[in-house]
Amino acid sequence: MAFPGTLGLQMSDQEFALIRDFIRDYCGIYFENGSKAIVEMRLARNATKLNLRSFLDYYYLLKYDERREQELQELVESITTKETYFFREVSQLKALAEEILPDILQRKRSRERVVRIWSAGCATGEEPYSIAMVLLEDGRTEAWRREIIANDISKRALQVSRLGLYGESSMRAIAPALKQKYFRREENNRYRVLDQVKSLVQFAHVNLLSSERLALLPQMDVVFCRNVLMYFDQEHRRRVVNAFFEKLEPGGFLLLGHAESLMSLSTGFDLVQLTHDLVYRKP
């Protein structure tokens, strides 16, 4: 019996194990044993579009077919969640503005005057643009070079980020004054990010498991990786956290989602209680 949404294809336990492990090794996203129905539903349309007769054929295409590179992008789009909005988890942005930035400016005042912040897993861009607005609102950084590097594995999400055009859902938590100052309202209740915000952000297509791509990034003062690690298994969480540790300047900060922690992942960071939030810091 074919269930709604499967388009006639059903996934065996063996096929699920093969595809689940392939996804984990490719991009770190891990589906638990009870997630077969979810994976089946999300990938059935991909396999059907390719005129494949089974999920095993789909697995072999991902592994060996000349179309694999294009389909890997389609796979990523099908399995990733991109729901976000401006000034999400605002307490962390307050911590950035009121405690983290002053600390960075104090420590680096006699060195290169640059603040670098990494938005790792930036989805459709609301997070790095929120960070950019925090920097623009802080007059102390005007004389500094401000660089926000934002990456995601989804090329479609990055297209939205670069376009910088958002609907009401993305604007639901932003202060009216910032909305008026840094956006231009367009037709159909859409809002376009102004160039002064865009100019601070560099978007790049990066897989967090690609050591070659990560090696190209400069050292960072702050890393935001919020609500990303929860989709990885333990091994790949540890691998990504180690990469963050290597990329952070001594004294640099790591900010995770409120449901995430470094427990059993890393002993290299110090847990620091700031006024607005708990953050991790490289000694």
Image (cartoon, helix red, strand yellow):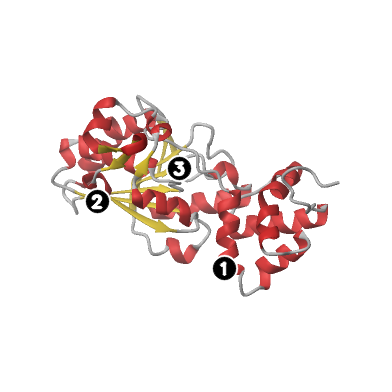
Q: Quadrant of residue 88?
A: top left
Residue 46 in picture, x, y percent from top left: 65, 57
Residue 38 in picture, x, y percent from top left: 70, 44
Amino acid carrying mark 2 in the image? Ser
Say which of marks 2 and 3 sits in front: 2
Q: Residue at x 53, y 37 (%)?
A: 261
Say which of marks 1 and 3 sits in front: 1
Amino acid carrying mark 3 in the image? Phe
| Mark 1 vs mark 3, CA separation in Å | 36 Å
Q: Residue at x 18, y 42 (%)?
A: 141
Residue 84 in picture, x, y percent from top left: 46, 37
Q: Is residue 242 above or below residue 165?
A: below
**In the rendered image, which residue does mark 1 sit on?**
69
**In the rendered image, which residue does mark 2 sit on?**
199
Q: Quadrant of residue 185?
A: top left
Q: Residue at x 25, y 44 (%)?
A: 197
Q: Residue furthest right?
A: 1
Q: Earlier in the sequence, mark 2 or mark 3?
A: 2
Q: Earlier in the sequence, mark 1 or mark 2?
A: 1
Q: Quadrant of residue 159?
A: bottom left
Q: Residue furthest front?
A: 187
| Mark 1 vs mark 2, CA separation in Å | 31 Å
Helix, strand or loop at mark 1: helix
Helix, strand or loop at mark 3: loop
Amino acid carrying mark 1 in the image? Glu
Q: Which mark is residue 269?
A: 3
Q: Is residue 211 above or below residue 34?
A: below
**Is residue 253 something one can see in this rendering?**
no
Label 3: how many residues lie within 10 Å, few (<14), some (14-19) or many (20+)? some
**Is residue 213 something one can see in this rendering?**
yes
Asked if residue 98 lies left or right of residue 142, the reply is right
